[in-house]
Each structure stands twice: as C-alpha cells, then as structure tokens.
C-alpha cells in the first residue's frame, strides 16, 4: 500500500502561481504518478502524469503546468503558472505501478486532495 500526502494548495488570483507537492511512502522511481482534479459537480479529470518514460499533460494545462519528481526524496510536484478560475478544483495525487496512465481508473493509490482556488 502506497501512502500519498499532498500539500501546497491555496487561494490565488488569476494569473498567479502555485506549487503542489506529493510525498510518497514508497520509492517513486518504480511508480507512475499523476495529478487529477475534481471541481464541484464535475468528474475527476486528468491533469498531468510522469513516469520513467516521460510526462503527459491534459491539453487544458499544457504550457502552464509542469510536473516533476525527485526520486531521491520520493516526492512529486506540480508547478502551476498562469492560473485561471477554471483551474479551481480539489487536486489529487495518484500513483500506480506500471506504465504512465491518463485515466483515474488506472490508478490504485490516492492522496486526500488539496484545494486550489483561483479568483478572477
């Protein structure tokens, strides 16, 4: 069982930046990890993912968000720039064994979520 803990959410004005972090209880280099988000009344959606192969981003965040990880510290981060009100959601860190995935159904381990609110 992999434990994931997110941090770094908060309130920011449109155009601002936030950095989310996720700490894993297991060595991250063996995992594919991702960020998902869920806004009120909407389904959970893919944001970005990273594995030993590379990275993948949702079209809505390409060029604004950057996913990275530090395998020495078992952490993953999501740098979010040029934030928009539509980025407002609870952001979840997720992990899986095997290949990188973009569907929430593929991920076995989830953090508790951290709220990101972007004001206009």
Image (spheres, helix red, strand yellow):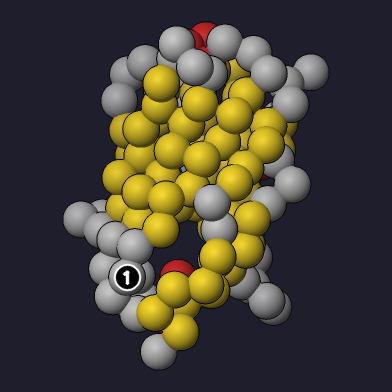
Nearer to us in this view, 47 or 99: 47
Q: Up-down: is 67 above or below 64?
A: above
**Coordinates of residue 58 in the picture (x, y in percent):** 36, 54
Q: Say if residue 106 shows up in the picture.
A: no
Nearer to us in this view, 16 or 95: 16
Q: Quadrant of residue 78?
A: top left
Check the picture and name the quadrant holding the N terminus: top right
**Coordinates of residue 106 in the picture (x, y in percent):** 62, 34
Q: Answer with left or right where residue 86 lies relative to residue 67.
A: right
Check the picture and name the quadrant holding the C terminus: bottom left
Which residue in the structure is indicated by mark 1?
16
The residue sitting at 34% across, 63% down in the picture is 17
The residue sitting at 69% across, 78% down in the picture is 41
User: Residue at the bottom extreme?
Assistant: 120
- Determine whether the residue tagged by mark 1 lies in a helix, strand or loop: loop
**Coordinates of residue 2 in the picture (x, y in percent):** 72, 21
């Amino acid at each position: 069982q992999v434990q994931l803990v997110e941090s770094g959410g908060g309130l920011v004005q449109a155009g601002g930046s936030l950095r989310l972090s996720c700490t894993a209880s297991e060595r991250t280099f063996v995992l594919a990890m991702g960020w998902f988000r869920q806004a009120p009344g909407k389904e959970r959606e893919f944001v970005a993912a990273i594995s030993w192969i590379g990275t993948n981003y949702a079209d809505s965040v390409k060029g604004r968000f950057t996913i990275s990880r530090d395998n020495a510290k078992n952490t993953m981060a999501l740098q979010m720039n040029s934030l928009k009100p539509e980025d407002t959601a609870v952001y979840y860190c997720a992990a899986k064994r095997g290949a990188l995935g973009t569907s929430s159904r593929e991920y076995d381990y989830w953090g508790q979520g951290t709220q990101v609110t972007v004001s206009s």
